[in-house]
Image (cartoon, rainbow, N blue to C red):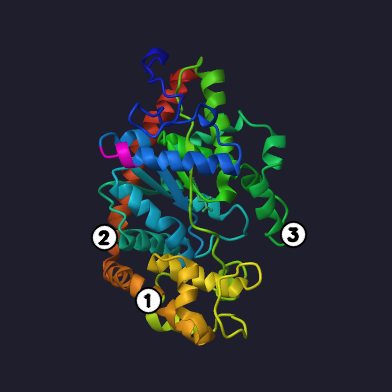
Amino acid sequence: MTTSTLRATTTAVPDASPEDPGTPAVLDGVSTTYAVARDRSAVLDALIDGHAAEDPARFRMLTGDRPTGPLHIGHYLASLRNRVRLQDKGVETFVVIADYQVITDRDSVGEMGTNVHGLVLDYLAAGIDPARTTIFTHSAVPALNQLMLPFLSLVTDAELRRNPTVKDELALSDGRPLSGLLLTYPVHQAADILFCHSRIVPVGRDQLPHLELTRDIARRFNTRYAAGHGVFPEPEALLSEVPLLLGTDGTKMSKSKGNVINLRDTADETAARVRAARTDSERRITFDPDARPAVANLLTIAGLFLGEAPEAVAEQVGNGGAQALKRVVTEAVNDSLEGHRARRADLAADPAYVTSVLHEGNARANEVAERTLATVRAVMGMSY
Ligand code: TRP
């Protein structure tokens, strides 16, 4: 392919057409701050509603997870449900199981195969449709990984070292020295996003710096190596509406603290986990995240599953105290996940099917990645 045949795709999602809600000029294509990203996400949501069905590639989306363990209700509420919603609106979807990202901050790979298999089970049980959504793993897509080399040339070590998410992750890794992979994984993540020319990346607030870096890499690649041709579009963040959820003890969710409810847990395991949840001794249940964070968190979880505001859940529990609150939470989680868990168990009985879904996804991702890498090598004068 020659540069002249490349598509001009420097702008991310194209501007609103006249009947769209409109993109205020000041927001156009920028997402440097949280507030701006929030506003832009609302615009993107409206554009997706209006146009995804007729033009799926325009809103191509990539998201992913690290296969470090089972997915929990936080993943379900904040991202899985949303992926399915967008897929069902017609958005062309890629989901990376980020196996190479697992080894950014630990010494061993852990139960990689089991964890990857478990992620696919939860995706499928949640309603991700492998016929429409490409599910793949990093390690099976060499051409994606090769993009990391030219991309690394486009960032400085100072930029990488000041990335707030990398700094946080380093701080959480028990005094481990910063590995080269942890320092550069945001560049690898840019390769995840850009190899398939995705326009939309659903993220939590903590991932915004990565998206900014991805946009920088796309822009710099186009300018420095592609004579200004839009080889890579600049993707945009679609921020999750869901507030940060805590574990059942009111602190950060963590497998090792035993404060998480996993999607694959049974109804009884869920009930036991909620029964052991931290609350307080005040009889009347109120939604007060500052003064009563653990109670507020349980109300938030119940509210998200029930489709109600946490204040409304608090109102219903009223003077029932912690016991009544826990009953509401357990029922909300178990009733909402009953179908998911049943489908997951059925799928788990057919491991060959899960493997075939991965093989097919990997094959599709390889095709896309090889095409992109061929373009990259062509514009860089490296097709021999
Ligand atoms: N870093 C993400 C996480 O820890 C997973 C991920 C990998 C990802 N590649 C991505 C997310 C690309 C969005 C886009 O959950």
Q: Which mark is residue 306?
A: none
Image x and y of residue 129, in percent: 28, 53
Residues 124 and 103: in front is 124
Residues 325 and 178: in front is 325
For disc 1, the marked residue is 334
Residue type beneath disc 3: Gly
Q: Which mark is residue 175?
A: 3
Q: Earlier in the sequence, mark 1 or mark 2?
A: 1
Rounded to the nearest whole Å, what is the CA distance between mark 3 and mark 1?
A: 39 Å
Rounded to the nearest whole Å, what is the CA distance between mark 1 and mark 2?
A: 26 Å
Q: Residues within 10 Å of mark 3 (few under 14, many from 20)?
A: few
Secondary structure beneath dot 1 equals: helix
Q: Residues within 10 Å of mark 1 (few under 14, many from 20)?
A: many
Chain part drawn in magenta: 49-53
For disc 2, the marked residue is 353
Residue 151 vertical position relative to residue 336 in the rendered view, above or below = above
Residue type beneath disc 1: Asn
Residue 168 vertical position relative to residue 304 in the rendered view, above or below = above
Nearer to us of marks 3 and 1 is: 1
- Relative to residue 121, is residue 74 drawn left or right? right
Secondary structure beneath dot 2 equals: helix
Image x and y of residue 77, in percent: 44, 61
- At x 52%, y 50%, the residue is 100
The answer to the question of whether label 1 and label 2 lie on touching residues, with beta carbons closer than 8 A, is no
Nearer to us of marks 1 and 2 is: 1
Rounded to the nearest whole Å, what is the CA distance between mark 2 and mark 3?
A: 41 Å
Residues 278 and 159: in front is 278
State the quadrant of the C terminus. top left
Does residue 179 appear in this view?
no
